[in-house]
Amino acid sequence: MHHTIEKLQKERILSFLPLEVKPAKLEVFDSIDSTNSYLLSQAKNGDHTGWVCLAEEQTNGRGRLGRTWVSPPVGNIYCSLIWQFENFENLSGLSIVIGVLITYLLKHLGVSQNPQLKWPNDVLIEGKKLAGILLESTDRKYIVIGIGINWAAPLDKAIGLSDFLPGSLSRNEIAAKLIYLLFHYLPIFGQSGLSVFLNDWRKHDCLFGESISLILPNKEISGVMQGINDKGELILATARGEECFCYGEVSVKK
Ligand code: BTN
């Protein structure tokens, strides 16, 4: 289905937000180096929890593991948010939570295809990457949550939202729904931890039971993926028994 690309506009986004959701600040840039870099630099000067930044284009978009996140102005969503958590013990599960929230977003948007979650936080549809998440913090006080959602994907390995939206939803409404979900569920995660989200993760966990390689900075470990534990770590059944990992890059064995 063809969708026109509506420009992101602060006032439109705010008009779609329910009254109880009040970003401390909401900024929309035509072009910026990286919404995450921008908010990381802002997070250093004071209390900015709840500050949201969106851009039409990023000239230096960043992905996980030092990769580039190609960010042309073609309707993709580039969104970052500063959040402060009281309890840092819970943070390892944050990337899991954000992945789950993107599945909620797709459901809210009426996407009927079942999204897959690939640990730690890729969101796929039909096996292709729809969205990526980058979590960063300066001093562990504030976390910058960066979310990139493809609208139209030029790459073979990726896929875009525009192919799956049932009607003509405004991009501003999509951005507002994303912001709403973050503001609604992050306090719940802050209070109750990951347990609330684990079932939903498991429904979409596309690696469960797969033979995978986990690529770490200095080695590669093979095993069968056994899901995630209550901290959001990957459980791998290896030749040495079950081991849990809090980071790494997964490749699925064919
Ligand atoms: C990944 O899958 O590697 C994570 C990609 C994260 C991309 C988003 S787009 C908004 C925010 N700003 C960035 O520079 N990166 C994140």
Image: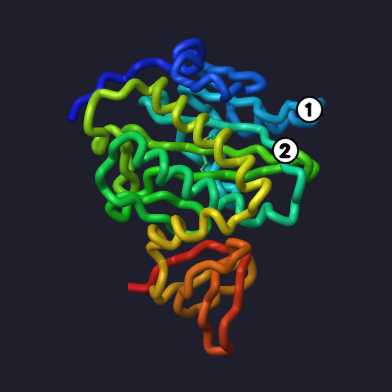
> Dividing the picture into quarters, in which one does residue 46 lie?
top right
Structural crowding at the residue carrying mark 1, measured as other residues with C-alpha within 10 Å and reported as few (<14), some (14–19) or many (≥20): some
Of the numbered discs 2 and 1, the one sitting upstream in the chain is 1
Q: Is residue 79 left or right of residue 75?
A: right
Answer above or below: position of 49 versus 129.
above
Q: Position of residue 16 (x, y in %)?
A: 44, 19
Q: Nearer the viewer, residue 175 or 195?
A: 195
Q: Secondary structure at mark 2?
A: strand
Q: Is residue 82 left or right of residue 151?
A: right
Q: Which quarter of the rendered picture does the C terminus lie within?
A: bottom left
Q: Is residue 215 visible?
A: no
* Residue at figure coordinates x 41%, y 49% from the top left: 123
* Residue at figure coordinates x 53%, y 24% from the top left: 54
Write down the residue under mark 2.
84
Q: Secondary structure at mark 1?
A: loop
Q: Which quarter of the rendered picture does the N terminus lie within?
A: top left
Q: Are marks 2 and 1 in contact (CB under 8 Å)?
A: yes
Q: Is residue 170 left or right of residue 112?
A: right
Q: Is residue 32 visible?
A: yes
Residue type marked 2: Gln
Write down the residue under mark 1.
47
Q: How many marks?
A: 2
* Residue at figure coordinates x 32%, y 38% from the top left: 160
Answer above or below: position of 73 versus 205.
above
Q: Nearer the viewer, residue 1 or 33?
A: 1
Structural crowding at the residue carrying mark 2, measured as other residues with C-alpha within 10 Å and reported as few (<14), some (14–19) or many (≥20): many
Q: Position of residue 192 (x, y in %)?
A: 64, 52
* Residue at figure coordinates x 49%, y 21% from the top left: 17
Q: Position of residue 87 (x, y in %)?
A: 75, 49
> Gap between marks 2 and 1, in whole Å?
9 Å
